[in-house]
Image (cartoon, rainbow, N blue to C red):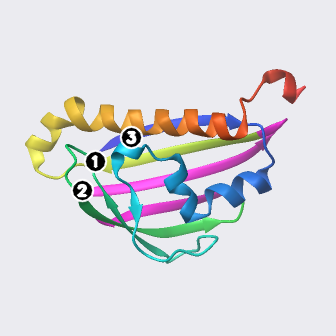
Amino acid sequence: MYTLKRTQRIPMSLEEAWKFFSAPANLQKITPKDLGFQILSEVPDEMYEGLFIHYKVSPLFGIKMNWTTEITHVRDKEFFVDEQRVGPYKIWHHEHHFVEIPGGVEMTDIVSYQLPLGILGRIVHPILVKSRLENIFEHRFKTVEEKFGKYEKEQAA
């Protein structure tokens, strides 16, 4: 099992952050274009436990894949969890945490995942998968910063 953890501070209220990040349609706005991310199912304005979301993605080499996630846990303005039900991973468990801080919100993503194909999956992980996931989350960080501004320590004072 592998884990990726990213934390970002955003100069916006907890309510604004929750409204943006808990709206499934906004995921496409912060996902790299080269991922070929496309939501196939109708999605509500705000997610809820038990929501299934169907996507098309091209995670590697432009190969299109179906991906279905389920929102398994939601605690309003605190966290939500999406888990893969169909897709490229053997296991995908993605936690999104939100904490109000002076001058903004601290958002933490924790992704726990496992690749299919046993030893072959473990071999390709450091070469292809780990760096690709890091690039996706780096793109999200930069896009969120461009969209909402850079958190400055002076704002918190």
Image x and y of residue 95, in percent: 51, 53
- Regarding mark 1 in the picture, which secondary structure is present there? loop
Nearer to me, 95 or 132: 132
Image x and y of residue 113, in percent: 33, 49
Please determine whether, in this image, residue 66 is positioned above or below residue 20.
below
User: Hey, what amino acid is under mark 1?
Assistant: Pro
| Disc ID at residue 28 | none
Q: Which residue is mark 2?
A: 88
Label 3 vs label 2, nearer the camera: 2
Q: What segment carries the magenta color?
A: 79-104
Q: Are marks 1 and 2 in contact (CB under 8 Å)?
A: yes
Which quadrant does the C terminus fall into? top right
Nearer to me, 117 or 64: 64
The prevailing secondary structure element of the residues shown in magenta is: strand
Q: Are marks 3 and 2 in contact (CB under 8 Å)?
A: no
Quadrant of the image occupied by residue 7: top right
User: Hey, what amino acid is under mark 3?
Assistant: Thr
Cα separation between marks 3 and 1: 18 Å
Q: Which residue is mark 1?
A: 59
Residue 78, can we see it? no
Cα separation between marks 1 and 2: 8 Å
User: Would residue 60 be found to the left or right of residue 138 on screen?
Assistant: left
Please determine whether, in this image, residue 10 is positioned above or below residue 14.
above
User: Hey, what amino acid is under mark 2?
Assistant: Pro
* Residue neighbourhood size for the residue with mark 2, other residues' Cα within 10 Å, grouped as few (<14), some (14–19), many (≥20): some
Label 1 vs label 2, nearer the camera: 1
* Residue neighbourhood size for the residue with mark 3, other residues' Cα within 10 Å, grouped as few (<14), some (14–19), many (≥20): few
- Regarding mark 2 in the picture, which secondary structure is present there? loop
User: Would residue 91 be found to the left or right of residue 3 on screen?
Assistant: left
